[in-house]
Amino acid sequence: MIFGLENRLEVSRNDRLSVPAGGTDISNVTRLSFGLTSETAIDRLEFLASGAVIVENGNDEPGTSFDFGREALDLNYHREVPSAVFDLGVSYRSDEVDEFDDELADIDETGTRTDLSINTALEIGRTSAIGFALGAGYSKTDYVDASDPDLVDVTESRADAAVIFHISEIATGRVGLRYTEREEEDAASTRTDTLVTYAGLDYALSERLDLSAEVGYTESETEEFGITDRTTGPDLRIGLTYDMPVGTATALLRITTDEDEGQRETFEIGRDLETPSMTISAGLGVTHADETGTDVIGRLNLAHNLPDGSLGLNLERSVSYDDEPVTTTVAGVSWAKTVNDISSISLGINYELRDAASERIEQVSFGAGYSRELTADWNLDSGIGYRIRDDADGHAESPTLFVSLSRDFEFRP
């Protein structure tokens, strides 16, 4: 069992990068957490719960506010025997809307968001010629006092079933169904039902080359204002993995069908390698859809271990559809150095570009941090940050300064 305590004091100006610039926000967050891990030869249980006492003086409310929030809970259970495996996961989180993701378009949104998800999976007959796999999931997102009218409550239920054929030591086949029901509490009372039927095969073509293929068919029905639209099309995935002297090389062809943008075809080649001092993961490909046209996509993640620290590089270009085609480019460099046995420093620079017909958003973020072990139990983390943003509203800047004290108490019954 691990009991955690962290107190973070943060001062920031124009935290939401608004135009004209907002004032200064001062917050003191005391976070309490409890974690439990239990493991035997056949199962593993992990549980983590946390919450925070928040004292804040800022622009959203006059004066100083006191609140208990940022609640989070995660439960994961895994049980495995030679003939069967069972997984259960439960997740809950409640926080301010802008704390959930780093979407550039959502930086100035306000309100409270609560997420709940439950997932379970069971596979039996793993040592038999024929096995079965069953899965189910439920997720719900609720918004309270959200400033963006497009942020609506969403409920999604999922279920899947498959028959697995253990053909030989080098070949495994499967036939199955996936069903998803999604309901949105918007003005149109949108409901989407999606059914995917598929057949798949995993086959070792040689000692170094593996094939993973899945051919499916998607049927989707979307109801808005009482009118139903039906979308059908292929759902295909063919992947090859080749074992190199160092790492692996991959090729992936993916065809999906979506009710918003129709059919999308994506082809990507990749290379992963790991040496004692460096890890590289790279991919380059092309994607096409009727709504967005043809675009080049790619990614590069590099982590290099230095004698007294580390150096990281991240590059990515992706294409998505959010009521319109959106191209996202991300570039980042991080550096960390160990000063001595008890302290270290770090630097980071990130660039993000979200390019769409309705708005072009650019944001650059700088960060520097210092960490130190004050005692055998207490840790100090501090840092400064600076963000620069250009969008349809204009130019915005936001500096940040923080200092944090933390400690974990471990107990084994």
Image (cartoon, rainbow, N blue to C red):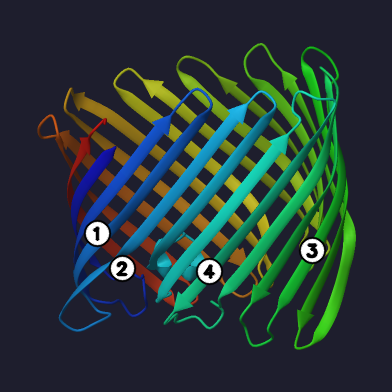
**Residues under labels 2 and 3: Cα distance?**
40 Å
- Where, quadrant-wise, is the C terminus in this rendering? top left
Residue identifier under label 1: 400
Residue 192 locus on image (x, y percent): 75, 71
Where 219 falls versus 242 (above or below)?
below
CA distance separating discs 3 and 1? 44 Å
Instruction: Compare marks 4 and 1 and give the one earlier in the sequence.
Output: 4
Give whichever of 396, 216 is nearer the camera.
216
Numbered label attached to residue 194:
3
131 left or right of 3?
A: right
Name the residue type under label 1. Answer: Thr
Residue that badge 2 annotates: 15
Residue 141: image tag: 4
Q: Residues within 10 Å of mark 3 (few under 14, many from 20)?
A: many
Q: Where does the image place residue 301, in percent across and percent down from the top left? A: 53, 35
Choose the circle earlier in sequence order: 2 or 1: 2
Can residue 101 be seen in the rendering of this structure? yes
Q: Amino acid at mark 4?
A: Thr
Circle 3: residue type: Thr
